[in-house]
Image (spheres, rainbow, N blue to C red):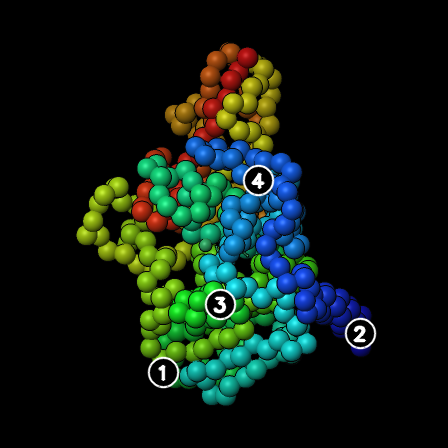
Amino acid sequence: MNKHERDISAQRRKLLGSLGALGVAAFGGSLTARGAESSTIELPFDNGERALTSAFPQKSGVILQRTRPPLIETPFDVFDQGVLTPNNRFYVRWHLASIPTAVDPATFRLDIRGHVNRVVSLTLNDLVRKFPRFEIVAVNQCSGNSRGFFSPRVPGGQWANGAMGNARWTGVRLKDLLEHAGVGANAVQARFNGLETGVIPQTPKFMKSLAIDHALDGEVMVAYAMNGEALPLLNGYPLRLVVPGWYATYWVKMLHDIEVLDKPDENFWTAKAYLVPDNHFANVHPGETGFNQVPIHTMLPRSFFTNVRSGATVRSEQPMLVRGIAFGGLNALKQVQFSANQGQTWTDANLGQDYGKYSFRQWHTVVSFPQPGKQVLMVRAVDATGQAQPNTPNWNGAGFMRNVIESVDIDVV
Ligand SMILES: Nc1nc2c(c(=O)[nH]1)N[C@H]1C(S)=C(S)[C@@H](COP(=O)(O)O)O[C@H]1N2
Ligand SMILES: [Mo]
């Protein structure tokens, strides 16, 4: 072995060690938060008070939105601390309540079947040792991120802006796995299935499908690590699909079964759930009917302030550092524009290190105001194709794809 090979094999041993770290019965049979919640946080909309909790396995200091199935949100100040969202603060969303409390890495198998040349059943060892390692930094954002800001309000998890996170995902290209099984000539989609089930047997399994060309694009991947460690159980241990640039609903967790289909998937979660109005911002008027709907798909650019919030005060003539994060969605982020005069004029903010086109990117600028008074700061992201964020928020009845130029009101004193 040369040095490079030794390094790779040391990395593999480390990862395999961490993949095997969650044995059977890892969490005493419970994923439910236990114990009293010590503090609360106020999300910036009506009825926004929530408990902060550390009672879920491998999670600490996160916002409790719902206990079962778990819905937990990342407190927004976490995004001010770095571009990668730490695993223990990363948000969690599950649809069905019977989630395995442990997965045995020794007996776990990923099956690839359906319209393939040969059915395969892979161990975690196979994935780590037999396929080239692939890595990407990418934003995982729930379709309903920011739903709590919809006006009029809509039913569903009342998230603030923390149903998203950015991580370095390590694993294997889905393309390599599908080619290993050999995709049949008549394949149209690949369907991904997680290990959990509903409480009653009639509940449709959580499965999502992608067009076969998308599945084979060389970027969609099966991740066994997140920020260099095994995935937290609640984020899909031991394997999850990563679909860069696409909403997180496609990022199937506890992925154990891939079925290549020769006709379009008709299952509930792919065909009937997660539909959005068929226009750029998925935007309709409250009460509007008769519009076309399509399955939610790619993400649009967004930007946020992370170190100032409405109500902040700043002294006149004193330089104020303003910073935040932004991302491009499907396309790379091109620029982040900042306005200190309610959107009359815009300047380019400075951008931080580039972790790749699907990642968060930090931005910052320095501003100062000569006179005391009320001021409005605004930020908007523009992607490489020139798409920018809208002045007014979009709206739809499901509360999906919230997008608007973010603003904060400050007092100059
Ligand atoms: N197996 C499984 N995978 C799933 C889901 C689920 O309910 N079950 N929910 C999806 C949705 S809607 C979201 S927003 C993301 C959330 O990913 P996270 O919990 O790792 O943050 O997981 C996706 N993958
Ligand atoms: Mo979601």
Whether residue 178 is situated above or below residue 145 in the rendered picture = below
> Which amino acid is tagged 3?
Thr
Name the residue that disc number 4 marks.
51
Whether residue 257 is situated above or below residue 310 in the rendered picture = below
Report, in whole angstroms, how far the alpha carbon at label 4 lies from the one at label 2: 52 Å
Earlier along the polypeptide chain: callout 1 or callout 2? 2
Q: Which mark is residue 186?
A: 1
| Left or right: residue 403 compared with residue 52 | left
Q: Nearer the viewer, mark 2 or mark 3?
A: 3
Name the residue that disc number 3 marks.
197
Earlier along the polypeptide chain: callout 4 or callout 2? 2
Residue drawn at (36%, 57%) of the image: 274
> Which amino acid is tagged 4?
Ala
Q: Could you tell me which secondary element the residue under label 3 belongs to?
A: loop
| Left or right: residue 150 compared with residue 369 | left
Nearer to me, 352 or 21: 21
Report, in whole angstroms, how far the alpha carbon at label 2 lies from the one at label 3: 46 Å
Earlier along the polypeptide chain: callout 3 or callout 1? 1
Report, in whole angstroms, how far the alpha carbon at label 3 lies from the one at label 1: 30 Å
Does the residue tagged 3 have its C-beta within 8 Å of any atom of ligand 1?
A: no
Name the residue that disc number 2 marks.
2
